[in-house]
Image: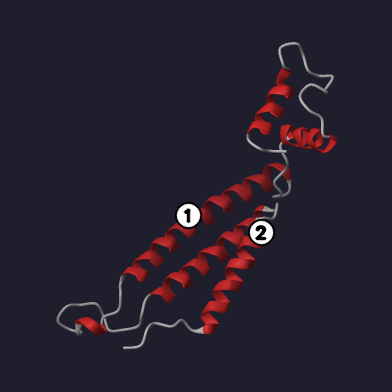
Amino acid sequence: MSPNIPNLVYVVVIGVLFATGVTLLLERSLTRVLMGVILLGNGANLLLLTGGRAGGPPIVGTTAEEDMSDPLPQAMVLTAIVITLGMTAFLLALAYRSWHLNGHDEVQDDVEDRRIMELADRDEGPGTSDTDTADGGLEARVLATGAAEGVR
C-alpha cells in the first residue's frame, strides 16, 4: 500500500488559511481577530483531516482491518470545531460589548504600557527620571522589572 501523500491543493489551502489567519489575528480590530480565529480553526481542521487516510468504515466485521480508516482525525476535528465555536462566541460577545460601549471594536493600548514605551523610546533608565522618589518610585520599579525580563 502506498503512503498517504496529501494533495498539493490541500497543502496550499492550509498554508493560505494559516497565513491569513495569523495576519488577521495580529490586527487591533476584534472583528478581524475573530475572522483570524475562524480561519485558523478551519486551517487546523483541514490539517487534521489530511493526517487520516481514506478507507472503509472502522467497524469490526464489515471492513478488513488494513482497509479501515482512522477515526482519530475525525474525532480531533470535531473537538477543534467545538473549540473554534466557543472562541467565536466569546470574541463575538467581546466585539459586541466593545461596540456597544465605545462605538468601535478596536483594542486600545493600556495607559501604563504606552508610558513605558515612551520611556523606552527616550532610553531613560530608572535613575534618570525626575519622577523617581527616594524609595525607587513606581516608574523605577516598572523599568527595573522590564529590564530584568529583557524587555526594552
Left or right: 78 as drawn, with respect to 109: left
Q: Quadrant of the N terminus?
A: bottom left
Which residue corresponds to mark 2? 32
User: Which x, y percent locates residue 48?
Assistant: 43, 70
Foreground pick, 100 / 144 = 144
Which residue corresponds to mark 1? 86
User: Which x, y percent locates residue 92?
Assistant: 58, 53
Could you tell me how many numbered marks the image carries? 2
Q: CA distance from mark 2 to mark 1?
A: 17 Å
Question: Which residue type does callout 2 highlight?
Answer: Arg
Question: Which residue type does callout 1 highlight?
Answer: Gly
Foreground pick, 147 / 71 = 147
Foreground pick, 27 / 130 = 130
Left or right: 100 as drawn, with respect to 41: right
In the rendered structure, find residue 96 and report the number of the disc placed on it.
Answer: none
Q: Residues within 10 Å of mark 1 (few under 14, many from 20)?
A: few
Q: Quadrant of residue 2?
A: bottom left
Please name the residue shown 54% across and 83% down the image: 9
User: Which x, y percent locates residue 95?
Assistant: 63, 50
Can you say whether 8 is above or below 132 in the image? below
Q: Quadrant of the C terminus?
A: top right
Can you say whether 25 is above or below 150 in the image? below
Asked whether disc 2 touches disc 1, contact meaning CB atoms under 8 Å apart, the reply is no
User: Which x, y percent locates residue 120?
Assistant: 79, 36
Q: Earlier in the sequence, mark 2 or mark 1?
A: 2
Q: How is the image coloured?
A: secondary structure
